[in-house]
Image (tube, rainbow, N blue to C red):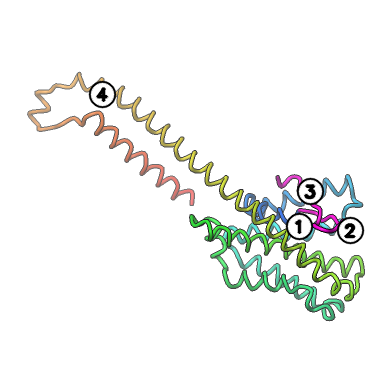
Amino acid sequence: MFIFIPFLKFQMIGSTHKISAYPSLSAVCGLLLGPIYGFFAVVLVTLVYFFFNSKAFYFGIYSLIPPALAVISAGALSEGKWKYAAIILIMGLLLFYLTDVGRVAFCNPCLSILALLLVLIFREKISKLLFNKDYKKLIVGAIILSFTSVMVDHLYGSILGIVYLNLSAEDYISVIPIFVKERLIMTLIGAFFVIFAVEISKCFLKHATKLKEKLIKSYIDEEIKINYKNTFNIDEDLLKKYNVKIPSEEEQKEILKTLAEVMILNNDKDKN
């Protein structure tokens, strides 16, 4: 899905204006690919699209900046590294207010400030909310993640509008009601994709666990059949003499299953 970020557009309700949909998808890209791979994926695809249709990018090659930072923020938040997202937002706000337009249209980044406050309040809890079993908490986490990434994109897009297009403070003030509505719609779309991605991932993991259990069971059954045949060659009198008991097939299966689970657990710990 992330491959088509620059190509996706959606029509605003009650308007002929078309908005690029990548801010809506930046959250799910960051979630699935993380901050590093997500960054490279977005930059690579955007560059390819830029060379094919450079007119679609209002800020020229600098149009790479907003989506790239949005994906980095989303990826960092989904991994619990909230400080990176906070730094990106703080830097963006500082840059915006350092401009003449920013000091006049000081209300323009109000939603970006709200996003920063949410990051500072929830911090690593955002990541925990995303992967929580409680569906309501998942929705809250998805909305925060989507909202933050959308507002990072908007904030840096606003800065580019000032620097690259020389937009006036009046332009920014006049569009506040419009961009608030647009960004909230993008947030909801992004949250939907995040929830969808999380649920699909859970489904894959669930079936992967079942498949792993089936493979282990199949291997154990086969191993027991082979080994149990060899027990007939054992001297039973010798076993009785030393009071040694050979475990039954079921007992052997349970022992091997326990050993397999311990080995898998230790292997997972080593990876972490």
Q: Which residue is mark 2?
A: 58
The answer to which of marks 4 and 2 sits earlier in the sequence is: 2
Secondary structure of the residue carrying numbered label 4: helix
Q: Are marks 3 and 2 in contact (CB under 8 Å)?
A: no
> Where residue 147 appears, x then y in whole percent?
68, 63
Magenta extent: 1-21
Rounded to the nearest whole Å, what is the CA distance between mark 4 and mark 2? 73 Å
Image mark for residue 8: 3
Secondary structure of the residue carrying numbered label 2: loop
The answer to which of marks 4 and 1 sits earlier in the sequence is: 1
The answer to which of marks 2 and 1 sits earlier in the sequence is: 2
At horizontal 79% and vertical 77% (from top left) the residue drawn is 97
Q: Are marks 4 and 2 in contact (CB under 8 Å)?
A: no
Say few, some or many: other residues with alpha carbon within 10 Å of mark 4 (under 14 / 14 to 19 / 20 or more): some
At label 3, the amino acid type is Leu
> Where residue 205 appears, x then y in whole percent?
51, 43
Q: Which residue is mark 1?
A: 67
Q: Which residue is mark 4?
A: 228
At label 1, the amino acid type is Pro
Secondary structure of the residue carrying numbered label 3: loop
Nearer the camera: disc 4 or disc 1: 1
Say few, some or many: other residues with alpha carbon within 10 Å of mark 1 (under 14 / 14 to 19 / 20 or more): many
At label 4, the amino acid type is Tyr
**Residue 228 left/right relative to 206:** left
In the rendered image, which quarter is residue 76 located in?
bottom right
